[in-house]
Structure formats: C-alpha cells, structure tokens
Image (tube, grey):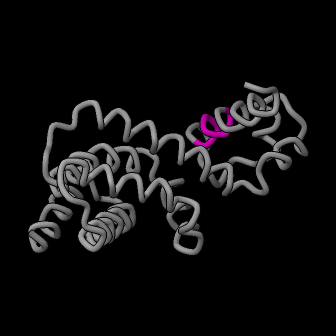
Amino acid sequence: MKKREKTRQLILEESWQLFIDQGYKDTSTRQIATAAGVAAGTVFSHFPNKIDILKTAMHQQIDSVIALAQNTDQHHSARLKLRHYASHLFAFYLQHREFSKALLGDLLWHQSYFAAQLDAFKHLLFAEQEYDETKATVMMDCYFMTLIQGLSDPSSCEESMLRTLTNKLALLY
C-alpha cells in the first residue's frame, strides 16, 4: 500500500473511532486530522468534506458486515437471503443510529455513491436463482423503507424491523 493510501485509510479508521466515541455531529475534521496525526489540509486532500469521510467509512463497514453475514448464509431464495443479511445490517445500522441517519439523509440525493455496492448486493441475493431486476429492486425498496422507518423510531429494534421486512416481502411472494 502506498503512503497516500495508508494515510487515507488511517484517516478513515481514526474518523470511524471518533464517530463512535463522540458522535458524527460532534466530530470535527480538525479532530480527525489530529487523531490521524496529519494536517487538516491533508484530510481535505483525501475527502472533500466530513460526509464523504462518513460515506467511505460506512461503505467499508457495510462491506465487512455483508462479508461476515455471507459466512453464515445457507439460504437459497432471494427473500430468505435478504432477511438473513438484513438481520446483520439492521443490527449494524441500529448500533450506529446517529451516523446511519446522517448517511441515509445524504444518500437520498447522492444514490450513485453506493450504486455498485447495492447492485452487487442485489445479485448476491439472487446467487442461487435467476436474477430478476424488478424483484430485486422492489426488495431493496422494502428493505430501505424498513430501515428508514426503523431508524426514525427510537423504540425500533432489529427484531421488529425484521418482522416488518418479512411481512412486506410476504406480500411479494
């Protein structure tokens, strides 16, 4: 890994830890720079703003959650696969509710950032059956609306979100 890549990764790791410790809103780019041992300008040479740091860090974290869930995925249908992955992802998003909400708010207007990751996820769900773009898209709509509703309700838990998603998917199949 080149020095620039190492610095970028260090900024991501330190920012993630600060977001967890202090919250996304209460973490400044200056604090991120200090924690990473770089100048404030260095942070901005890698990321144009704080939300882009969060997006990149979340992208990495989501990839890790999906990879871990993949190790225990024994389902054959897309519906059951989505439920399996959603259980892991919902737990992750609820654990990091504050910056999950910040990220989702930004993604409503910048969906292209996660397009490749989302497309790969849709294909993963259909790994053992013929890919159906329409079904995959509707399943993602159900998933994301359940996620948004769950993050908006402080009393939401992983189990209630999974029940809601399961009920929505049952209407499709």
Can residue 140 be seen here?
Answer: yes
User: Which of these two is toward me, 47 or 15?
Assistant: 47
Q: Specify whether 170 is left or right of 25.
A: left
Q: Which of 10 and 72 is in front in this view?
A: 72
Q: In this view, does 128 lie above or below 74?
A: below
Q: Residue at x 10, y 74 (%)?
A: 171
Task: Give the residue drawn at x 78%, y 27%.
Answer: 2
Residue 90 image offset from top left, x and y in percent = 32, 50
Is 24 on the left or on the right of 34, as rendered?
A: left
74 relative to 93 in the view: left or right = left
Q: Where is residue 80 in the image (x, y as percent from the top left)?
A: 15, 52
Above or below residue 44? Residue 6 is above
Q: Kindly identify the residue that appears in the image at 28 percent across and 66 percent down.
A: 136
Quadrant for residue 39, please give it.
top right
Q: Can residue 146 be seen in this view?
A: no
- Which quadrant, please, contains the N terminus? top right
Label the magenta part by its dominant secondary structure.
helix
Please state the total of marks drawn on the protein image. 0
Tell me the magenta residue range: 14-19
Name the outermost residue toward the front.
Answer: 130
The answer to whether residue 30 is magenta is: no
Residue 40 x, y percent position in the rendering: 88, 43
On the picture, is 19 further left or further right than 152?
A: right
Q: Is residue 155 above or below residue 62?
A: below
